[in-house]
Image (tube, helix red, strand yellow):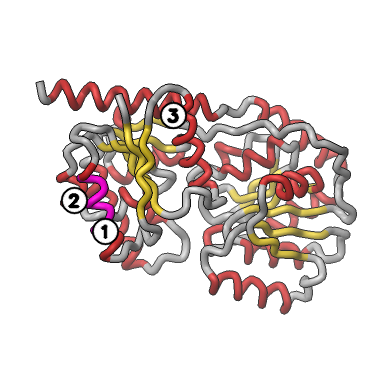
Amino acid sequence: MQAAFAIPGDLNTRTGGYIYERRMLETLNATGLPTEYVALMPSWPHPTAQAEAEAASKLHALPPGTPLILDGMVFGSMDTAVLASLDRPVIAMLHHPLGLEAGLPPDIARALIARETANLRHAAHVVVPSPHTRAILIRDFGVPEARISIALPGFDRPAAPAELVAKAAPPLILAVGIICERKGHDVLLAALDRVRDRAWQAAIVGMTHDAAVEAALRRQCTDLGLDDRVRFTGVLGPEPLDRLYRQAHVFALATRYEGYGMVLSEALLYGLPVVSCAVGAVPDTVPPGAGLLVPVDNAAAFGDALALVLDDPGTNAAMAAAGSAAGQALPRWEDAAAIMARAVTQVAQDWQAARG
């Protein structure tokens, strides 16, 4: 049996969603389920007419009956009639519903939710990265529980460094997340301003998804007088990012929503205390004792949490130990791929049985 996995844009983009799908694709092939990569144009989930035509053409060209894993940005926003016309079982790979993205105009959010609701009726199965996303699909989108599988992201354990990496001085507050409204970097900056009397430095790592958000963040940083203490690094490769994780004192992400939040688990793997927000899948991802979770958009509470981790070595050490223990229990990519492979096998069998 063979499958196909359709993904828009650059597969090597360093965001959680792309890393998840690239590693899933690689591991499916490595563990015995041949899976063709179908590259689609990058404008999804707001596709150009050319992107829509390309997707329809490529998906229809796959051999009839080939199980198709379809990236959520495409699945949730493509024309329902095109999706329904595909002669194959479709598995939706949904990180979180598209209409829940922070900062969307209300009319666009409603349109995305309506489209995704309609499209989910044509999914033979849905694979999600967290119990939180499954619960939303059952409660708000009417997807039967039996048609949803949870494939938690896999994680590689950090390799031992070639040389000892010392903790940064002053203490480094590390945030990793693309530059967009949903990641809440503006709240982090406001919280950092509230602890400016402490010794610290901060690094915000991530690609620019929204240039207007980046410009606003840089203006905010300048207006707060934090330019000499906060740096925006852009995208970093694995080695420099590994070094920052090892140098950091605390991981901080003031996110407004996460369907999983892979960087939070990465922080646990490095034994970093986590300061984040009690929203979406974050409470499921950051176990009790490994971090402090505060309400969304509450810079005062976020600042208080940062102050506690910065000021109290005992709290920092206890959270680091709890996080490190939780990190060692995280699944590997082989575990995630096995769940996807079972879903693909089942929908293929059901498809063939229904056609005699």
Which quadrant of the figure has residue 169?
bottom right
**Image quadrant in which the C terminus is located:** top left
Report how far apart the C-alphas of labels 1 and 2 lie in the structure. 9 Å
Report how far apart the C-alphas of labels 3 and 2 lie in the structure. 26 Å
Residue at the spot of label 3 = 28
Q: Residues within 10 Å of mark 3 (few under 14, many from 20)?
A: many
Q: Disc 3 vs disc 2: Cβ atoms closer than 8 Å? A: no
Question: What's the residue type where badge 1 is placed?
Answer: Glu
User: Which of the pair 106/59 is nearer the observer?
Assistant: 59
Q: Residue at x 69, y 56 (%)?
A: 302
Residue at the spot of label 2 = 82
- Asked whether the viewer can see residue 182, the reply is yes
Question: What's the residue type where badge 2 is placed?
Answer: Val
Q: Disc 1 vs disc 2: Cβ atoms closer than 8 Å? A: yes
Q: Residues within 10 Å of mark 1 (few under 14, many from 20)?
A: many
Q: Residue at x 57, y 28 (%)?
A: 332
Give the x, y percent position of residue 252. Answer: 69, 52
| 257 sits to left or right of 175 | left
- Secondary structure mainly formed by the magenta segment: helix
User: What is the span of residues highlighted in magenta in the rendered image?
Assistant: 53-60
User: Which of the pair 138/101 is nearer the observer?
Assistant: 101
Q: Secondary structure at mark 1?
A: helix
Q: Residue at x 75, y 56 (%)?
A: 304
Q: Disc 1 vs disc 3: Cβ atoms closer than 8 Å? A: no
Task: Name the mark nearer the viewer: 3 or 2.
Answer: 3
Residue at the spot of label 1 = 52
Q: Residues within 10 Å of mark 2 (few under 14, many from 20)?
A: some
Q: Secondary structure at mark 3?
A: helix
N-terminal-most mark, 1 or 2:
1
